[in-house]
Image (cartoon, grey):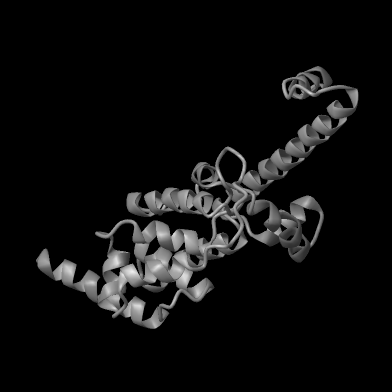
Amino acid sequence: MFDLETLRRAVDERRPAGALDAIAHAEAVAADLTALGERLVGWYVERARHAGHSWAEIGEHAGISRQAAQQRFTPRATTLTVADLLGAGTLDRYTARARQALARAQDHARRWCEPAIGPEHLALGILDDAASLAVRAVAHAGTSPSRLRRDLERRRPAGDEAPGPGPLPVGADGRRCLTQALREALRLGHNYIGTEHLLLGCAAVVDLGLEPAGLRTAVTTLLDEFLRSRE
């Protein structure tokens, strides 16, 4: 557990210029603790959801309604990093390629000086792997992957303030992409989540210039061709 002495040392390590400057550093340490606490609670909620507990069950245990539980805990889920989601079991169904795409998405978010991973960063992370089924499906559906990348890069915001050190969280829209990716996998009858499902999830959340139905058909066609080639 943290105690006052530990926290005082954390402030002193920031080398405040004097007693007044130390107050500002103490406030910064306190803010970091608050953010870490939100992330801690979010991780355990994420783990409970992965274990199959409904929002109604979580709310009942907390003495609140299902809706209140969602409103209270969902924002905390958007403080979780890719590593947090891996640890909570959320990404258990993800293929190695899909997990690598998530890692690259963080690199793109940081390159864009964004504080969280969003749909465009996820899409760019997928496009980095030209051999993936997702990228092949984009081309099969009649869209140039390189043109798609250029279109996405044009969305980069003008800001240039880099986020702080450490892993970035998957933001609210990014989490919606992950949720939709699961739905896409279930819709196609797959027991795993690959780059193709992740890209379909992104296309369902934001306009990437991809038509989801056409992309879905391309994925199915390519998978059928692959299975026939193994017969």
Residue 229 drawn at (x, y percent): 11, 67
**Can you see residue 192?**
no
Question: Measured along the vertical axis of the image, is residue 87 above or below residue 109?
Answer: above
Q: Quadrant of the image for the N terminus?
A: top right
Question: Measured along the vertical axis of the image, is residue 216 above or below residue 54?
Answer: below
Q: Residue at x 49, y 50 (%)?
A: 106
Of residues 205 and 62, the one drawn nearer to the viewer in this rendering: 205
**Can you see residue 5?**
yes
Q: Quadrant of the image for the C terminus?
A: bottom left
Q: Is residue 32 left or right of residue 144?
A: right
Number of numbered discs overlaid on the protein picture: 0
The image quarter in which residue 56 lies: bottom right
Q: Is residue 57 left or right of residue 93?
A: right
Q: Residue at x 32, y 68 (%)?
A: 146
Residue 120 drawn at (x, y percent): 49, 64
Residue 16 drawn at (x, y percent): 79, 24
Residue 23 drawn at (x, y percent): 87, 30
Of residues 220 and 66, the one drawn nearer to the viewer in this rendering: 220
Residue at the limit of the structure toward the right, as seen here:
20
Question: Measured along the vertical axis of the image, is residue 223 above or below residue 131?
Answer: below
Q: Is residue 192 left or right of residue 39?
A: left
